[in-house]
Image (cartoon, rainbow, N blue to C red):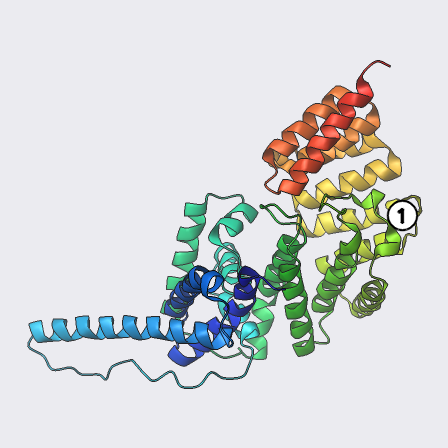
Amino acid sequence: MTSPEDLLRELAPQVLGVITRRYGDFASAEDAVQEALLAAALSWPAEGTPGNPVGWLIRVAARRMTDQYRSDEARRRRELLAASCPPTSPSPFTDPGPAPGQDDTLILMYLCCHPALAPGSAIPLTLRAVGGLTTREIAAAFLLPEATMGQRISRAKATLKAAGEPFRLPGPDQQAGRLRCVLHVLYLLFNEGYTTSSGPDLARADMSGEAIRLARMLRASLPGDPEVTGLLALMLLTEARRPARTGPGGELIPLAEQQRGRWDRALITEGLTLVTEALRHGPTGEYQLQAAIAALHDQAARPADTGWAEIQALYRVLERMTGNPMVTLNRAAAAAMADGPAAGLAILDTVAGQLGEHHRYLSVRAHLLEQAGDQAGARAGFQAAAARAGNVREQQYLMTKAAQVAADSRPR
């Protein structure tokens, strides 16, 4: 059964699309929908989920918008009266009317990726409006304080309001200019769902599932774009491993220890078809490369069959393309599997200044130190990684690894 929290996250972009379409004010609509979601979170667990949850949220959000408009109108009239001038324009309030039966999520994504916004503002705004992530979750993904991220999102909403763009799907030229931002948002949304940045569970299937749904929708609108197809392929090939990622108690099972017979073969088949199509039509982009890497993992019947040399080569191309230190981190892990732990550790040293305090860097380094026989360094690394991980399941796994290394290093 879907929890009220998951249902609210799923419905939020639908409601926001309806309210923005009716009132033409994204910034105020987003505030009103957030208030409606808060009201639902407080009342639904006690009173039960209403029969028409979308309608309930729309009514509450519309009421908030009406109250705001009336407050603004009253203030305007007082100001005009004080200036001894009659009103010169009608009230902006209009009857909200019935809810349109359409999904406005794509329009919201393109709107939030408006060219007036820098990517550092557009992406967090879209993650909140479309992905249903909280400001705290978004701040964690960007390694920023929550207050800083809240201010960034508020400024982004004000910029959008000043831009005054109508609520409709932009033309092909405008879509092309915003597509990179939209793809990055979907990528981050999927990653947050596949391995959450915080909380008691390893993953949030509803969030990664929503990212896949939106990627399918985007591909339906742009079927010939190889990067859109590549991103969908990457999601499907990664999602296929979900059934084997956790044990009976929800504990994390690393890739090398997963029962590959539990992987979703239908998703793998679909993902392989898509990545083949994407690479054939080029030019090759970062999501196609990542999908090709995921395909090599999924096609290996056993960990020993994995094409690590090919994966390392693909990461090298991706690294040159993006300059992302997390790609270098992944290349280091692949190099260790292909050429030994010393090769991986040498690559890790090149990004120590950028990622040295990140729990994933510390975790990979600890694994490589363990492979190299440095038990003390590995144990300290796993402990440090656990202290910095926000996800409880990752913390548990890393602490377990630290304990195992300590046990293995004791004299027999």
Q: Tell me if 7 is positioned left or right of 371 in this view.
A: left
The x, y position of residue 118, in whole percent, is 49, 58
The single residue placed furthest to the top in the displayed view is 411
Q: Residue at x 87, y 45 (%)?
A: 308
Amino acid residing under circle 1: Thr
Q: Tell me if 41 is positioned left or right of 299 in this view.
A: left
The x, y position of residue 333, in whole percent, is 78, 39
Q: Which quarter shows the N terminus?
A: bottom right
Q: Residue at x 28, y 72 (%)?
A: 67
Vertical placement of residue 50 versus 318, above or below = below
Q: Tell me if 58 is positioned left or right of 301 in this view.
A: left
> Quick check: can you spot residue 213?
yes
The x, y position of residue 62, in whole percent, is 37, 75
Q: Residue at x 55, y 72 (%)?
A: 105
Pick the residue in front: 244 or 359: 244
Specify the quadrant of the image occupied by residue 28: bottom left
Q: Which quarter shows the C terminus?
A: top right
The x, y position of residue 212, in whole percent, is 68, 66
Vertical placement of residue 19 versus 150, above or below = below
Q: Residue at x 59, y 41 (%)?
A: 390
Pick the residue in front: 87 or 386: 386
Pick the residue in front: 33 or 229: 33
Element class at badge 1: loop
Vertical placement of residue 66 versus 264, above or below = below
> Quick check: can you spot residue 374?
no
Binning the other alpha carbons within 10 Å of mark 1 as few (below 14), some (14 to 19) or many (20 upward) gives: some
The residue to which callout 1 is attached is: 306
Q: How many marks?
A: 1
Specify the quadrant of the image occupied by residue 211: bottom right
